[in-house]
Image (tube, rainbow, N blue to C red):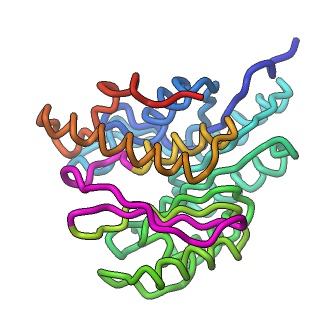
Amino acid sequence: MNHNNQKKIAVINDISGFGRCSVTVSLPIISYLGIQCCPVPTSIFSNHTGFPEFFFDDYTDKMQAYIDQWKKLDLHFQGIMTGFLGSQRQIEIVKKFLRDFKDDNTRVLVDPAMGENGRPYPTYTEEMCREMRKLVEHADIITPNVTEACILTETSYQEAFSMTELSCMAETLVDIGARHVVISGVDMGSEVGNVVASHEMDSKLMKHKKTGAFRSGTGDIYASIIAADMVNEVNFEESVRKAGDFVKEALAVTERMQIPKTDGLAFEEVLYKLQRK
């Protein structure tokens, strides 16, 4: 029996039942773009950690047994996408997953969810940061925010960077090993910038008019679109522009609906507008 007649992306991330982030964002978007989304849960949350209270179940001890069943099924993936990893052990499991499942036809997107607002998340030790730098060496695309780009390049964080400084960070990340880099969500006053760089092009700034406040799951939507486009062989720069346009439109609808910030983006309202290949 052949289970590999359709394009698939393995998404290694947590599952939050409410709050529109991680796998619950990636699954509908990747599916809508014509690719089977196969989650590998790293942990289970009733709702994400931006809420005052939440149920949490660490899935680390179960991950390898879960993955081993996929090996028995001889699954092949055209894409692998990683999100928040809660421990050094989980990073090691991801590295093994890449060794076991990545082949010449597999593309890898690493969304290095390590921190925001100038600080790493509390779970991210210096050793974990070093291991994440090693993980991005295996990526075709990485999608850090400014804080994460600083951590990965060992750059001191500041509230505002010049385009020259942002370009330098993006190009350093390309040198580390990623084929394509986008530093996303750069605050530019009334606009939001995305700095792209790759082996094929010099760094470039792409801007959108700012719409509403930051919301949970925005980066997951952004990375999921780019991951699906990566497998569908959409031009990288075109994909970054498409993801930015979609997030902007979803933010506008969410603001009009007065959705609480913790509840993420009401992207379901505009999913039908997302350009398919």
Compared with 201, 70 (above or below) is above
Q: Is residue 137 found left or right of 105 in the rendered image?
A: left
Residue drawn 42% across and 51% down? 219
Q: Tell me the quarter of the picture where residue 247 sits.
A: top left
In this figure, what is the number of numbered marks?
0
User: Is 215 colored magenta in this rendering?
Assistant: yes
Q: Residue furthest top?
A: 1
Q: Position of residue 274 (x, y in %)?
A: 44, 30
Residue drawn 49% across and 35% down? 26
Q: Which residues are magenta?
A: 190-218
Q: Position of residue 124 (x, y in %)?
A: 49, 69
Task: Indicate the quadrant containing the N terminus: top left, top right, bottom left or bottom right.
Answer: top right
Q: Position of residue 268 (x, y in %)?
A: 34, 26
User: Is 77 colored magenta in this rendering?
Assistant: no
Q: Position of residue 192 (x, y in %)?
A: 32, 61
Q: Nearer the viewer, residue 273 or 37?
A: 273
Q: Residue furthest bottom?
A: 156
